[in-house]
Image: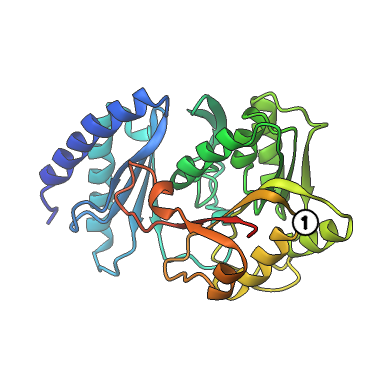
Amino acid sequence: MLRDFTPFVHRLQKNLRHTGKWARRQSISCYRLYDRDIPEFPLVVDVYADRAHVQEVDTGWQMEEADYEAWVTAVQEAVASVLAIPPQAIVFKTRRRQKGLAQYEKTGTAGEDFIVEEGGRRFIVNLDAYLDTGLFLDHRNTRKRVGEEAAGKRFLNLFAYTGSFTVYAATGGAVSSVTVDLSNTYQAWSQRNFALNGLDPLKHTLVRADVFRYLDDARLAGAKFDLIVLDPPSFSNSKKMSDILDVQRDQGHLVTAAMRLLTSNGVLYFSNNFRGFVLDASLAERYAVTDITTQSVPEDFRNRKIHHCFRFAHR
C-alpha cells in the first residue's frame, strides 16, 4: 500500500517558498531543496535550473518490486508538481554509501549536458551520466570565498573534479592557475567550463596527474602558489593512482606536501566529505589552522556535517 505523500509535498512547498526565494536573490540556479527532512521520505532533492536531481538514500528497507516502482513514480510526480516541471525533467537515483571514486562512477545513461549559473559563473552539469552531477553544491560558500580572495594570486586546484574552484579563482582575478586531476573525462569537463567562462588557456593550465606525484614534481620544479584548494575524495583505489588514498590516513602527507608549495603569506583550503574525519593534531601544531566548516556549509543544507573545511596558513 502506497503511503500518504501529503507531508512530503507540504514540506517541499514550504522549503521552496523559502529556499527558492533565497536562491533567486543570490543568483543561484542550483540548490538543495530537501534533505531527509521527514524520515519516512529518505530522499535528497536538488534543483538544477528547471530540472531536479532526486536521490534515494539507501535505508535497507525492503519493498516489493511493484510497490517500489509505484513509490518512485509517486516521488517523481510529487517533486514535478511542486516545482511545476514535467516528470521527465527529474532524474532519480539510489545513493548508497560511497566507496572509491564515487563521483566518477558511470550510471550507464548518457544524459544531457546543460548549463547552470552560480554567483555570476556558468557551469556544465549532467544529472544522468554519473553518480554526481559535475558541481558539488555543498562547496558553494568555499568557491565564493576563493573567488573573493583570488585577485592577483597564483592558484592551485588539487583533485579538481570539473574545475569549478578554478573558474571562481580565475574570474576573481587570479593571474594564473594549475588544475590537477587524474581523470581525462573531468579534465575535459574542466576545459569546457573554462571556455564557458572565458578563461585564458595560456594562463590557466590543466594537468592530468596523480596528485601525490604532481606535488612531488612541483616541489622539485620550485613551483609556488598563493592560494591552494585541496579537496580529496574520502577514499580512492583508482588503478591510475600509485597507491590507495585514504583521507584520514593520508591527510598529513597531502597537506604537508601542498603547504610546501604555498608562499609564506598564502592560504590553503583543505576540505573532505569523510563523515568521521578528525584533523591530525600534528598539522594543527605545525600550521595556523582554522576550522571553517560552520561557515562553509551553505544555508540550503540541512545537513551541517556534509563536509569538513579548514583554512591553513604558515605560522
Tell me which residue sits at (71%, 73%) in the image. Answer: 243
Q: Is residue 95 left or right of residue 261?
A: left
Residue 232 falls in which quadrant of the image? bottom right
Q: Quadrant of the N terminus?
A: bottom left
Left/right placement of residue 246 relative to residue 211 reads left
Left-right relation of 217 to 41: right
Q: Is residue 315 left or right of residue 9?
A: right
Q: Could you say where residue 211 lies in the image, as x and y percent from the top left? A: 73, 60
Which quadrant would the C terminus be assigned to in this image? Answer: bottom right
Instruction: Report the residue at 32% width, 27% height from top.
Output: 85
Which residue in the protein does label 1 denote?
209
111 or 124, which lies in front? 124
Q: Is residue 81 visible?
A: no
Amino acid carrying label 1: it is Ala
Q: Is residue 15 visible?
A: yes
Describe the element under mark 1 as helix, strand or loop.
loop
Binning the other alpha carbons within 10 Å of mark 1 as few (below 14), some (14 to 19) or many (20 upward) gives: some
Residue at the (47%, 71%) spot, across then down: 278
The image quarter in which residue 249 lies: bottom right
**What residue sits 45% from the left and 43% below the top?**
137
Going by the picture, which residue comes out furthest to the right?
221
Q: Is residue 68 above or below residue 192?
A: below
On the image, the x and y values in percent for residue 146 come to 57, 40
Q: Which image quarter: residue 82?
A: top left
In the rendered image of this protein, does residue 137 appear above or below residue 211? above
